[in-house]
Image (cartoon, rainbow, N blue to C red):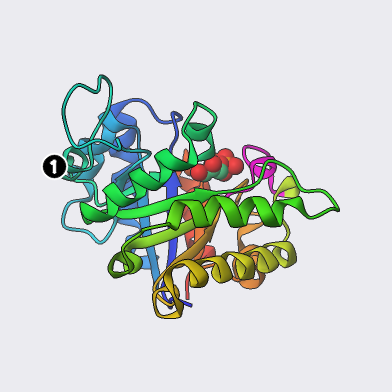
Amino acid sequence: MRKRRLVIGNWKMYLKAPRAAKEFARALRRHSAAFAGVDVALMPPFPLIPVVAEALRGSKLEVGAQTLSAYEDGAHTGEVSAEMLKALGASAVIVGHSERRAEGETNDDVREKLQRAARAGLKAVLCIGEKERDASGDYVGFLTEQLSSALAGFPKASAGKLLIAYEPLWAIGKTAADAMKPAELRETSILIRKVVADALGREALARVAVLYGGSVEPENAPALIAGGDVSGFLVGHSSADVEPFLSIVKACRL
Ligand code: 13P
């Protein structure tokens, strides 16, 4: 597994004002000397990327986007391309978040967007996750299909910029008590690595990070990072305020 840890704040549409985004990014930057061994990135809505990028400029903290277009240019109203994101200062992008899939994004769209991000040299945070878990274990087939479909044709040379965020839908937007437990996460992480190895090969697998997302809060972050066999977290609601986000980052320190 990769040595460094990663914590990514997916702001969704929680932080909306440029001033609040700037203050958040500055506060994070002030504390960044305490992030030993942890890479931290913020994923604001598109219009806030420039102010966050500006506030983080010259630091090791990164800014990314919450989605991107599968297209490069042309008649695609409302779309934002990988190159446009880079021009705004983004170095990473979330692909296939369940909230985008719920708006109609298909496995084919996700695969194209992932390759578009890789070709542009962006770090890509590929989200996968099952809707529910029951005793029959159907989620195993579902996750295998979702992940292998997204990775088909992915350039192995870009494996170092690929992050898989496992986000079970049933655990998103709840509380630490409802989140996945470390032992279950460990098993799922092994499954994810196997699928990545089958799709991209063992050598590439060593460069791919697996993250967990779904009600990561200051309360459950220490146990999940200690026992979940993941490199870090994709954090939703707990990334909307500086204090909880900071304590999650600190829980991941090496
Ligand atoms: P919550 O942390 O709010 O459950 O959201 C997780 C998520 O969807 C991050 O991408």
Disc 1 under 8 Å from ligand 1? The reply is: no
What residue do we see at 19% from left, 37% from top?
A: 72
Q: Nearer the viewer, residue 6 or 25?
A: 6
Question: In the displayed structure, does residue 242 sit left or right of residue 159?
Answer: right
Q: Position of residue 149 (x, y in %)?
A: 49, 52
Residue 70 vs 215, above or below: the answer is above
Q: Position of residue 213 (x, y in %)?
A: 56, 51
What residue do we see at 65% from left, 50% from top?
A: 142
Residue 132 vs 105, above or below: the answer is below
Q: Which residues are magenta?
A: 165-176
Report ligand 1 position as a quadrant: top right
Can you identify the residue that label 1 sits on?
87
Work out which residue is located at the far left of the displayed protein and give it.
87
User: Magenta segment: does it hold 174?
Assistant: yes
What residue do we see at 33% from left, 25% from top?
A: 17
Query: Is residue 238 in sight in this rendering?
Result: no
